[in-house]
Image: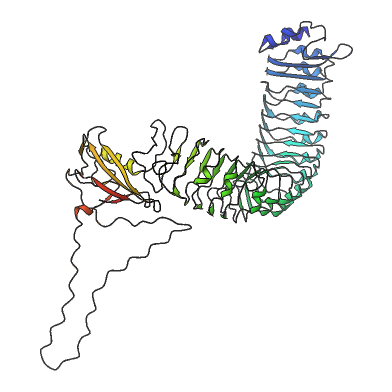
Amino acid sequence: LTSLRDQISFLVPARSPKAYWTAPDSCDSLFGVMCDWDGNVVSLVMSGANGPLPGVIGDFPFLYSLSITGNLSSLPPELSKLSLLTVLQLSRNNISGTFPSSILAMKKLRSLNLERNQLAGSVPPTISALSSLSDLRMDSNQFTGPIPSTIGKLTNLTLLSLSSNQISGAIPPAISALKRLVTINLQRNMLTGSIPSQASTLCKLQRLYLNRNALTGSIPTTIKALTSLRMLLIDYNSISGSLPAALGSLPSLIYLSGSKNKLTGAIPSTIGALTRLTYLALDRNSLTGAFPAALSKISYLQTISLYRNNITGSLPLGLSQLSYLFDIDVSYNKLSGTIPAFCTSDMVDLSILTLSSNNFSGSLPASLSLCASIYSLDVSGNYLNNNPATLIANLPSLAYLNLSRNYFTGLIPSLPSASSLLSLDLSSNFFFGGGNAYDAAATPVCPSASLPVNTTGNCFTYLASSPCTADPSYPIEQPQRALAQCQAFCRTSFSGSETTPVNDQCGSGGGVCIATATSISTVTGTATVQFKCSCNTTLYFLSADGLSCTPKPGPPPPYQPPSPPSPPSPPPSPPPPSPPPSPPPPSPPPPSPPPNPPPSPPSPPPPSPPPPAAWQVTRWECINKDLVGTCSCSCLSGNQCYCPI
C-alpha cells in the first residue's frame, strides 16, 4: 500500500490515498481498502487516479476486486498477476490502445467493465478465455471490426454490452449459445445483416437493444419465443417488411421502439395483447392501414408515437379512456374524422398532443379544457373550424400552441392573465379582431421576446390604438396588417407596382400613417379604416408622375375564402349577350328591285373610364395627392386588401 500510494498520481491529491492512507501498513480505517482476517488486501477502490497504473498493483495477489476511475492512461503487464480477481472496474478513464492482454490471464474474472475509455482495435477472439465472465461491458470506446464468433463460448454471460463503438459486420449466430443472457446491448454501432432467428433460443432475454445500426431484413417471426422480453429497441435501422403478428406473443413487453425503419403494412391487431406495454414508437416508417383500435385496450400506455406514416381511419374513442396516456403524436398521417374527447374521465397526465397535418375536421373537443397538465398542443394543418378562445383560456399549463392552417373563425383568442404560453401560432385561419381594441374584457395577444406570436394569413385589421407594440429587438414575423401596410407605403412612392420604389417624399424615414377604425363586422371580419399619410402635416402620397395615379383596369379579384375539403369554384360569369340573329332571307321576289337588307344591330358603346373617385387600388398603392380616403378591406387570397377609394 505504501508503494502504491507513493507511485500513483491523483487528479486531486488532497482527496487521494496520499492524504487519507495515513497508516498504509494497516487496513484499519483506510478508506477504499478492504482486508481479510490475515491482513491481506482483497479490495481496492480509488477515484481520481491519473496517468499510468503503476506495476506495483501486481503485488496484491489476494485482490479479488479492483475499481479505479479517473484518468488512467494505461495498464501495466503486472496486472496479469491478479489471478484471483473476480471484479475489474476500470470505466470512465482514458485508457487507450487495444484490448489489454493482461486481463486475459484472469481466469476467475466474473465482471469486466471497460466502458468510456479510448480502447480501439477489434474485440479479440481470445476473449473466450474469460470463461467465468458473466458481465461484460465495453461501451463507448472505439472498437471496430466484427463481434468474434468465439463470444459464444462465454456461456455464463448474463449481460453483453458493446454499445457506442464502431463494430461492424453481422450479429454472429453463435450468440444463440448464450442461454443465460438477460441483456444484449449492441446499439449505436455499424452492424449489418438481419436479426438472427437463432436468437429465439435466448429464453431468459429481457432487454434487446439493437437500435441505431444498419440492420436490414425483417423482424423474424421466431421472436415470439422470447416470452421474457421486456425491452425491444430496433429503431434507426433499415428493417423492412411488416410487423409480425407474433409480436402479440410477448406478454412481458413494456417498451417497443421501431422508429425510423422501412416497415410497411398495417399494425397488427395482436398488438392489443401486449397488456403491459407503456411505450410504443413506430414513427417515420411507411405503415398503412387503419389506426389500430386495439391500442385502446392497453390500459398502461403512456406514449404513442406514430407520426410520419400513411395511417388512415379515425382515432378510436377508447383512446380517451387511457388513464396513463402522457404523449400522443400521430402527425403527418392521413387520419380523418373528429378528435376524440380527451380528458373526459381519469386522463389526468396528458401533456403532449400532436395531431398536425392530417384531415381531422369538426371542432376541437371542449373536453380539452379539462386537460390541466397539457403542455404542448399542435393541431395545425387540418380542417378544424370552431373558435378555440374558451379552450385556450382554460389550459393553465399550456406552453406551446399551434392552431395554424385550419379554418378557425371568430375573434383572436384571448389569453388568461397568468398564461404560461411560450409560443403561439394562429396563422392561416379566419380569425379577426385584435385584443382589447375590439373586446374590452380580452387580454391582447401581443408578440414579444417571451411569446412569439404568428398571426399571418388571417382576416383582421390592427389599429394604431392597438395595445400591441412590436418589439424591434425580437426578429419575429409580424402579421400583415392594414396599418403596417399604410405605414410602409407612406414612406415610399411606387412606380406602378409594389416592388419598384422611387423617391421618398419626406426624406429619410419620413412619412407617418394615421389610421382609426370606423366600423368592424364580426361576421365577415372586414373593417373600414380611415387613413391619411402625413409629412410635416402636409398630406401626400404621390405616384411616379407626382400628380395622379393611373386607373387600375377592371375590378379586383373576387373574394374566394377556402372551405374544407376543397373550395367550390365560383359560378362562371354569364357570357355577354350575342347580337340577335339576322332574319332568314325572303323568298325569291317577282322581278322588282330587292328591298334593302335590315340594318345590323348597333354595337355597344365602349365602357366609360371609371371616375377618379372609383379607382381600384391594391394595398394602398395609388392615392391622389392630398387625398384622405376611406377603404373597406376584405381578406382575399394571399391576404391582400383591395380598397375602393
Picture residue at 43% right of the left edge, 37% below the top: 446
Please state which of residues 179 and 567 is positioned toward the viewer in this rendering. Answer: 567
Whether residue 387 is visible: yes
Picture residue at 81% right of the left edge, 25% below the top: 109
Tell me where residue 485 sits by quadrant.
top left
Whether residue 51 is visible: no
Task: Give above or below for 513 relative to 611.
Answer: above
Picture residue at 80% right of the left edge, 20% below the top: 65
Count of marks placed on residues: 0
Quadrant housing the N terminus: top right
Please state which of residues 344 and 59 is positioned toward the viewer in this rendering. Answer: 344
Tell me where residue 601 sits by quadrant.
bottom left
Q: How is the image coloured?
A: rainbow
Please state which of residues 27 and 71 is positioned toward the viewer in this rendering. Answer: 27
| Rendered location of residue 388, percent (x, y) | 50, 47
300 vs 27, left or right, is: left
602 vs 560, left or right, is: left
Tell me where residue 41 sits by quadrant.
top right
Picture residue at 12% right of the left edge, 83% below the top: 596
Please state which of residues 320 and 230 is positioned toward the viewer in this rendering. Answer: 320
| Rendered location of residue 270, percent (x, y) | 72, 53
Q: Residue furthest front?
A: 441
| Rendered location of residue 166, percent (x, y) | 65, 33
Q: Residue furthest right?
A: 38
| Rendered location of residue 641, percent (x, y) | 33, 49
Q: Residue furthest left?
A: 593
